[in-house]
Image (tube, helix red, strand yellow):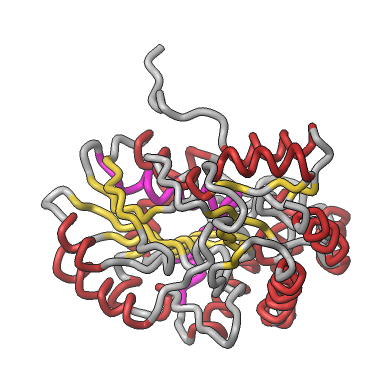
Amino acid sequence: MISKLPNVGTTIFTVMSALAAEHKAINLSQGFPDFDCDDTLKEVVNAAMQQGHNQYAPMPGIMPLREAIAKKIYNSYAQTINPDTEITITPGGTYAIFTAIATCIQPGDEVIIFEPAYDSYIPNVLVNGGVPVLIPLTFPEYRINWELVRSKITSRTRMIMLNTPHNPTGSILTEADIRELEQLVAAHNLLVLSDEVYEHLIYDGGQHHSILKYPNLFKNSFVTFSFGKVFHVTGWKMGYCIAPAHLMKEYRKVHQYLCFSVNTPMQYGLAKFLETPEHYLDLPAFYQEKRDYFLQLMADTKFTPLPCYGSYFQLMRYDRISDEGDKDLTIRITKEFGVASIPVSAFYQDGQDDHVIRFCFAKRKTTLEQAAERLRKV
């Protein structure tokens, strides 16, 4: 058999988590919390099961959940989204992204992707016959160079992929970025795929510039979200995609043959849980406290933090420690000091190594304290 992804192996997340387990290391590599979700969320999902909501849900998702999402979008971004025609519930944010690409990308279509990039983006494009056009974010600020973007657009450019807040860097799009994007989309009739799974994890009074806020962009866009990231239930694999009706109509054609429908009792539970906006409005303060505490703990180490404006990842430079490659360093720290992290070079196709590693701070205080204690010895 000829592989569709001949250059793809096991992800760095799987590798580092396995290494962490083997060496009994504290796992700050993979992006998941080590604390549980709200008891109320478990209770409302359990109640849905007890009430008999255990068979197939409608293909786009149950209407109470789609209505709850539409209300949340209006409250968050002052935009009216039609729950009937513009929202589809998906088994996770990564699935939502794949389905958007599968819906639109024809063989030979070019897709602009910014690196460092979340690891699913490029394989998603390749397996659907597209051509990834890779553009590096400027280091160390990890900003978009829009002049470079303009120089990369051709007659075959079909889509531009965005991620804000950004994994792995913690950077966010600015109002100026949005204006540049609007000009490009209008001039070249581009589609936009915006990964906004960390939408509520914005710090220091910053603002999340969701594509949903900008009608001129939204009419050409797929915007994807994750309940797993928002409500600390990454293992549930629950997310959704929002797109204008003409794009969502095509999206659902693909979705219905990939999974058809999504976990029914969890949809009812999430619909109920969303009735209390504080469950997501309190997230910025909740995670900023963790970020700040982690930075305070790491101040006594030889690692140097880069700015983190959003997400639950903190990048650290290690030039005061070693000149070895970032992958070698992360493996050595896992084995010798018992803390697992992710080398940022893993988010580049060419392995660009700026000697930066990523830590996940979505952990209990005791976990962060134990990790920092070990990292002070590096």
Magenta includes 189?
Answer: no
The N terminus, quarter of image: top left
Q: Is residue 225 above or below residue 329?
A: below
Q: Residue at x 83, y 59 (%)?
A: 373
Magenta includes 100?
Answer: yes
Image x and y of residue 158, in percent: 23, 52
Quadrant in which residue 159 is drawn: bottom left
Foreground residue among 318 and 6: 318
Foreground residue among 202 and 42: 202
In this orientation, does residue 125 appear? yes
Q: Which residues are magenta?
A: 81-106
Quadrant in which residue 284 is drawn: bottom right
Is 221 placed left or right of 236 in the picture? left
Q: Residue at x 48, y 87 (%)?
A: 78
Q: Residue furthest left?
A: 155
Q: Residue at x 64, y 66 (%)?
A: 65
